[in-house]
Every structure is written in structure tokens, then in C-alpha cells.
Image (tube, helix red, strand yellow):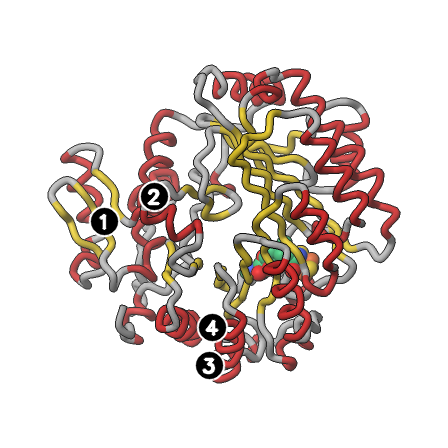
Amino acid sequence: MGPLTADLLKKYDVPVPRYTSYPTVPLWSDSPTAEEWIQSLERAFQNRQASWSLYLHIPFCESLCTYCGCNTVISRSHSVEGPYLNRLQKELSMYLEQVSALKVRPLKELHIGGGTPTFLSVTHLEELIEGIFSKVNVDPQFAGSIEVDPRRTNKIQLEALRKLGFSRVSMGVQDFNSDVQRLINRVQPKELTEDLTRAARALGYESVNYDLIYGLPRQTLETFLRTVEDVIELRPDRIALYSLAVVPWVKPQQRLFKDEDLPQGADKRKLYELASERLVKSGYLEIGIDHFALPDEALARARDDKTMHRNFMGYTTQTTDVLLGLGLSAISETPDCFHQNEKTLPNYDRSIDERRLPTLRGHKLSAEDRVCRRQILEFMTRGEVEFQNPEQKSDVTSFLSSMIDDELLRVDNSKLCLTEKGRPFLRNACVAFDMRLRRINPQTQVFSLAL
Ligand SMILES: C[S@@+](CC[C@H](N)C(=O)[O-])C[C@H]1O[C@@H](n2cnc3c(N)ncnc32)[C@H](O)[C@@H]1O
Ligand code: SF4
């Protein structure tokens, strides 16, 4: 992809969802009861081939990074570990008692995220994973992955996880510039990340991912390019390049940022452009949105074989019918339902102690939702999608006429295809298939009307 004109970046710089689910979480409306949620799981496993993935949320962090949009609990004390892990095991047991298929169907993926999962001691990590493995049927091709904060992770933890079959590790990096790091309350010398990357490689981890964020306070093209050059030198297998989500009404610590320090609009997008160009030039492939991978990495191979999948964890290499999320705020999904756990620790704890599933909310998918979900997933993972019928073709092409005129999209008989030039605007095009958003806000546009 050649450089994009500033005009295009400006024109399509409108807020659009990241589509890790359809409908997107703010548009969930029809919540299941805990009983309906269990029934949806049972329905999913009526398909004899159905397999599942497990997500565990460990919310704890020792300190708060001021940009953080994740669901965290800040605690210097590690006495919180034991009680939380007991409740996680109880939550799993409640599911196993009610949905017997979970005991026998292959568990294909286990992802531990947070917060900071390596907040847990090595003993607790081992007990947690061994406890789960003793209760379910782990697939021989099982993939285990974990998110780690290099400031709070040691080699012994990585070694223990590797012995338990974990093969992918994702490190929070964000930015190497010391000025930026100070402003985000996350001082993390490059050597720390470098050492942990070396350790992971020596232990035989197949894939090391770095998370980077563009749009952080005081990031400039020059400083961020330096960060990207440092990243290229360390050569992680995968890179997630996230746009800073600024949501001070949900995350008050973001109010500490000064407006004038935050790159915005086309200036912010330019940071992504520059980083992406540099990564592609040095051998990385751009995968879907926000993600880059070396050509022989599993995600790049999955994209080429058209087996890549997308769910709440982002892009994944395995397609499973059921994603079960355990722990604070964790989200689960089946072919016809979403389910989210309580988001505050006291509520979560109380539910588990009373032996109730910690259901906060969810969404039962309608027949139309299921079609939209399939089409958006197809477009997000393959960059092309088959129209349902001639009526949809006519609606979508008219809705996206501006993107087609700008050669960001191409209509190929019965298919809509993303062009090379259109890659940065994949999410804008997905809006055409987001019938809930379009119905709620018929004025929705994929470009800025102000230009
Ligand atoms: C759970 S954290 C990763 C593990 C660990 N807690 C750490 O920070 O190293 C998940 C990732 O979400 C991203 N993230 C957090 N807050 C964000 C925000 N406001 N906007 C964009 N990305 C964000 C960061 O890149 C972060 O590494
Ligand atoms: S970015 Fe990671 S370490 Fe920082 S507060 Fe958020 S979850 Fe915790």
C-alpha cells in the first residue's frame, strides 16, 4: 500500500466500531437470563463437532497506567489472589455441572487476560491452570496464550506456563519513549522488554506479541518512529497497534491528559500510517485491522488459509463455536447469544458465593443479527463478503458509494471486496452491514460530512 493522502485520512476519520462482536456491546438489547444463557450453551453443543475456547480474566494490576481502558482492580497487596482464584474455579464448576458437554468437548484455546495475569504468583498460576485441565478435555492441538506486563513478569512464570503447554505470550509495550512513559505512569525500560522477549524465545514460545498504542500524550511522528524502529529490532512475531481509546467519562484517570498533548484526527491517524508503512517495509504483514505478523506466524498463515477468526480477544487462529469467559467482566459467546459477567468485584464475589452465575447482561441474537454477524466477521477476516441477495447489493453499494468512488472498495459481481488502498478503512465499510446501528441512527455515515 502506497502512502495515503491526508485528504482520505481526514475524510474517513469518523468514529466506527472495532467489531470484536456483532451487535457491538453498546447496542446489546435483549439480555438472556442465566437460565437462557445455559440453554444457549446446550444448544451450541448439540452440534456434535462443536469445540470451545476459554477466556480467564485476572483483573489485578499493581499500579494504574493513566491511559488504561481495561477492566482492572488496582491492588498492591497480593492477598487478593487466593480468594479470586477460588471463585474462578467455582464459576467453572457451576458451568460443568449444568452443561455436561463442556467436560467432554475439546478445549482448543485458553487465553488468560486482564488486568495483569502475571500479577499471580507462579504457584497460583500453576494451580489455576492445572485445576482447569483436570476438569476438562484439553485438545491435542490446544493453544495457550497469556497477556503479560514485562514490569511484573519473571522468567520463572514464563517457564511454568511453557511447561503447561502455553505457546503464545503477549507483552504490553505501548511506547518506548521515556517522556511518553512518564506521562502514562508506565516506566518500562526497553531492556526489560528485550530480556523477557529473549527468555520467551529461549523457552520455545512460538509467538511473542507486542501491544503498541498510537495517540498517547506527547507522541510525535519522530518519537513514535523511534519506538517502531526499536520494536523492529526486537522482532516480535506479532504486533497489535491500537488506537488510544479516549473515554474519560468511563476512565476518569484519562482526565489527567491535557488536550494539547493528545495527537488527534488526521495527526493521530498519521502515526498509524507511519508505523504501518515502516512495519510492512521491514517484512510484517498487515492482518485485518490493528494487527501485524511475520509471514510464518500462525495468524498470518491462518489469514492465508482463510481460517482466521475474530472474537472478543481480537483476531485468533482457531474457530470455535463457544467462547466461555470466566471472571470479572468476562464476555462469552455462542452462535446465538452473548453473555457478560458482573463488572465490579463485590457483585461478582456475591454471585459466586451465592452459587449464582454472575450474569450482568448479554444479547440474544435475532435471525437478522446472525446474518449481519456472519457478514461482518467475513469482511473483517477476509476483506471480502458475498452479498445476501440483489437488494442487499444495491443497498450496500449505495451506502458505500463514496468508498467505491475513492477506490477503497470494489464490487465484484456478487461480492464486496476491500482494495489494498482501502485497508485502513475496513471498519468504515463494515458499518454497511451493521443494521442495528443504521436503524438506530439512520444518519450514520462512513465519512465525515464536515468535509
Ligand atoms: C490487559 S492489557 C495487557 C497486559 C498488561 N496489563 C500490560 O499492560 O502490559 C491489554 C492491552 O490493551 C491496550 N489498551 C489498554 N487501554 C487502552 C486504551 N485506552 N486504548 C487503546 N488500547 C488500550 C494496551 O495496549 C494493553 O497492552
Ligand atoms: S495497561 Fe495493563 S498494566 Fe496498565 S493498568 Fe491497564 S491492564 Fe493494568
Q: Quadrant of ligand 2?
A: bottom right
Select label 3 or label 4 by which is in front.
3
Percent x, y of residue 319: 43, 36
Q: Are marks 1 and 4 in contact (CB under 8 Å)?
A: no
- The answer to whether 430 is drawn above or below residue 213 in the figure is above
Instruction: Tell me the crowding category of disc 2: few under 14, some 14 to 19, or many 20 or more residues within 10 angstroms, Cα based.
Output: some
**Earlier residue among tags 1 and 4:** 4
Q: State how far apart marks 1 and 3 are (Cα).
A: 34 Å
The residue that disc 2 covers is 438
Residue type at the position of mark 4: Gln
Q: Are marks 1 and 2 in contact (CB under 8 Å)?
A: yes
Q: State how far apart marks 2 and 3 are (Cα).
A: 35 Å
Residue type at the position of mark 2: Arg
Q: State how far apart marks 2 and 4 are (Cα).
A: 26 Å
Tell me the SS state at disc 3. Answer: helix
User: In the visual, does 8 lie left or right of 112?
Assistant: left
Instruction: Tell me the crowding category of disc 4: few under 14, some 14 to 19, or many 20 or more residues within 10 angstroms, Cα based.
Output: some
Task: Quarter of the image for the N terminus: give it.
Answer: bottom left
